[in-house]
Image: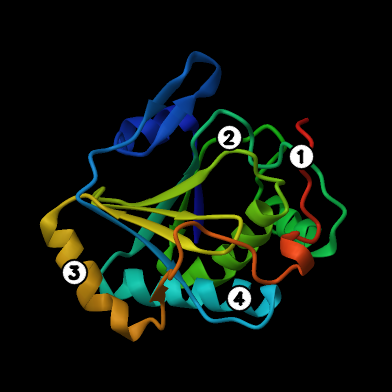
Amino acid sequence: MITKLSRKNCLQLYPKLPWSIPYREMYVFPKVYKQYVLTLPSKTAKGHAKNIGIALQMLVTAMRYEKLIFLGDTTTPWLYRQNSYRPAQEAADYLTRHTIGKTFNGGLLVDTTRLPEFTKHLFWLVRSNIVLPVVYAMDEEQHIVINLCQYGNLHICTLDKKTDSAFNKALPITGLQFLDAVTCYEIFGKGGNIAGRKVLIG
């Protein structure tokens, strides 16, 4: 199940969620205990989109989270930009089917049973730059922050020692691996380019 929450209610219920107002140079992020970048060995972007969602589901299920709340860090709507690239359009259609309109900028509370499908589409939304804000996810008790970047890597921040221990205990069953690089990079597109990605603002 996917439940919509207004942006105001979302930040009231989950005050540790990151948010920002770039033009005012305001950036709010919870105090981090440890941070990690995780990836999966994948041959294609399509396969990676599917597998990263399954791995995320395995991780949060092992950590006994029943739901994750997803929210963009700025007030820009989820479907602010259109993109005719087929995987991107299918991802936008997925949100539309869940009654996400063009002005909605609130949170999405996603059951862990829905994470593989949701994450697959989120991968394409972020990768193609339909979603302009950085989308963060957090468990309902606010112990972990998760972000899926444009390259398909999971950026994980644990917020306390107990959560960090649970995270590292759960990690081996997921197939996720620590990124062996200083920064994230493109492995699926030719010459480091991301197919279907719009870079123009607006």
N-terminal of the two: label 4 or label 1?
4
Q: Is mark 3 on a helix, strand or loop?
A: helix
Say which residue appears at 33% left-offset and 35% top-offset.
29
2 vs 4, front mark: 4
Q: Nearer the viewer, mark 4 or mark 1?
A: 4
Marks 3 and 4 sit apart, C-alpha to C-alpha, by 25 Å
Q: How many numbered marks appear? A: 4
Relative placement, left or right, of 86 versus 142 is right
Q: What element carries label 2?
A: loop
Callout 3–callout 2 Cβ contact below 8 Å: no
Q: In which quadrant is the C terminus drawn?
A: top right
- Please say if 126 is above or below 195: above
- Residue 162 versus residue 191: which sits nearer the camera? 191
Mark 2 = which residue?
A: 105
The residue beneath circle 3 is 166
Label 2 packing within 10 angstroms: few (<14), some (14-19), many (20+): many
Marks 4 and 1, how far apart at CA: 23 Å
Q: Which callout, 1 or 2, points to the residue nearer the camera?
A: 1
Residue 189: numbered disc: none
Q: Name the residue under label 1.
A: 81
Percent x, y of residue 163: 18, 60
Per the model, the C-alpha gap separating discs 3 and 2 is 31 Å
Residue that numbered label 4 is attached to: 48
Q: Where is residue 76 in the image (x, y as percent from the top left)?
A: 62, 31
Circles 2, 4 touching at the beta carbon (< 8 Å): no
Query: Would you say the residues marked 3 and 4 are in contact, meaning their CB atoms lie under 8 Å apart?
Result: no
- Asked if 30 appears above or below 22 in the picture, the reply is below
| x and y, in percent, of residue 157 in the image | 31, 53
Residue 154, quarter of picture? bottom left
Q: Earlier in the sequence, mark 1 or mark 2?
A: 1
